[in-house]
Amino acid sequence: MHALKENFMRMQIFENSDQKDKFLNDVMKNVEIYDTESIRKVTQYYAWIQFNFSYCRPLNIFLNMMVNKQSDANNIQVKKIIIEILKHFRLLEQNSLCHGNIKPENIILIFQDYTNEIESINFTNYLFQQNQKDEENIKTIVLNLLNQIGYQELNQDNIKNKSMRDILEEIYQINLDVGNKWLNKITSWGQNASLFGQTGSVKGQARKINDWSIQFKGEIENKIREFKNEQIEIFQQEREENCNINCEEQLQTEEELRQTNKYEVSETDNQDQQVKNRSKETIEQEWLKLIKKQQEEFFLQLTDTIVQNTVEKVTSECFDHQSLQQKNEKFKDSFKVINKVDLDFIIDKYSATSVIILEKLLEIFKGIYTTFLEEWKKITDQHYKEYKFDFDLQFEDQVKEHFDELLIIIFKYSFVQQNFVNYNLLEEQKLIEKQFHEYYDDWISYKILDLINNLI
């Protein structure tokens, strides 16, 4: 597995500001110690934590590798992993922190450079809820790992009433000398037939996943590029139409000024209108530049989110013995027994699913993008119609906030709950409309009061 160079991610979602503060001030300082490269981004909605398969591994994949006899970790190394998991859970208790979502895929093993020597443990995807199942899940994980090294003194019956401290003490006392009565299963795994078809080794599978992931990322980037080019073309057409409309309105206004005697300073009014139009155009260009900048960052993050989640799903299923057992069960009547992982099939399956999700998300995102532009136009049109003073309202924070919120909605519902989030993203459009107008109303009220104070 050290040959697999791809990244995978965990998105720590914050349901409220209290969870964010607890994660940053309590969890990260006292329990989960990350290196600077691991924390990719922190917003009010999430913390993006990034790992690399070459020296990190989700526990569910590590366990499946052991069960499938594809791990070269020895039983002393596994014992150390069990100890680190138990110590990490006790660290949560000592800091009065509740996780609420402990399971193998949320436990990340960090190894020393290209070895199976455990360096540290991270628990991920905190829910910050009291959950009795957390302790039960830790005990189940411990039993599963102990079973792989043949230790049977702890079992489902006698572990129930043991405290975590007692279990930890017992694990410390396990003697793993060669003369022990249990079989060192792990050292014999290399003698078994390969699970992996033509590539013939874990390294071969890792190289194949590396090569595929580069191609897959290119495919995702091309689809996003095509979408952006299409949006640019549509926008340019709309801008030309708006420009023509504005020019016609300007000509009509000038004609009305020439034909009426009501305006003694028609030339001045005309100049004011031209200045206003130039000001509006300049602000519009700045707005579009801001949208483009945030959109580029959003699409980079969306690409990595899709690629990293897909790579992890492919890797996970490669070592999923239950998946093989289910296939064997399906074909047992026809005497067809499947003993090898079909990596090509797994790659095709998850690639196709991720591309479908992306295409659907881009279709929905088109509506979000349009909402940004339409709401901006409504607000600026209203402002320049009713007021003569400059429009210097800054929407940058609101735009960043909505793009961050979009990403977490997509991650939470598309990749965690496996649905297309239509409802949630449509709600996001309504929220954009509401917040933009409320933000403008607050600003214009302050502006008017400021002007009155200056007059006084």
Image (tube, helix red, strand yellow):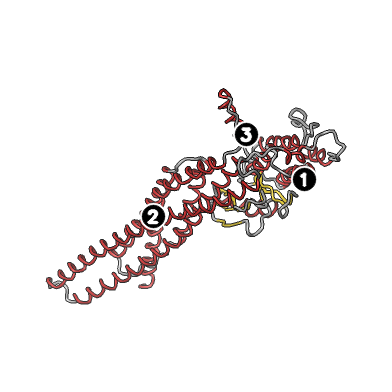
- The correct choice, above or below, for 87 with respect to 441 in the image is above
Label 2 residue SS = helix
Evaluate if marks 2 and 1 touch, with contact meaning CB atoms under 8 Å apart. Answer: no
| Foreground tag (2 vs 1) | 1
Label 3, on which residue? 339
First in sequence: mark 3 or mark 2?
A: 3
Image spot of residue 431 (x, y percent):
41, 50
Dot label at residue 369: 2
Q: CA distance from mark 3 to mark 1?
A: 28 Å
What is the three-letter code of the residue carrying label 1?
Gln
Q: Is residue 289 visible?
A: yes
Q: CA distance from mark 2 to mark 1?
A: 51 Å
In the depicted view, which residue is nearer to us: 58 or 210?
210
What is the three-letter code of the residue carrying label 2?
Tyr
First in sequence: mark 3 or mark 1?
A: 1
In the depicted view, which residue is nearer to us: 70 or 264?
70
Dot label at residue 77: 1
Label 1 residue SS = helix
In the depicted view, which residue is nearer to us: 340 or 381?
340
In the depicted view, which residue is nearer to us: 375 or 2?
2
| Foreground tag (3 vs 2) | 3
* Quarter location, residue 322: top right
- Tell me which residue sits at (22%, 73%) in the image: 270
Q: CA distance from mark 3 to mark 2?
A: 48 Å
- Compared across the picture, whether 189 is left or right of 338 comes to right
- Tell me which residue sits at (45%, 62%) in the image: 293
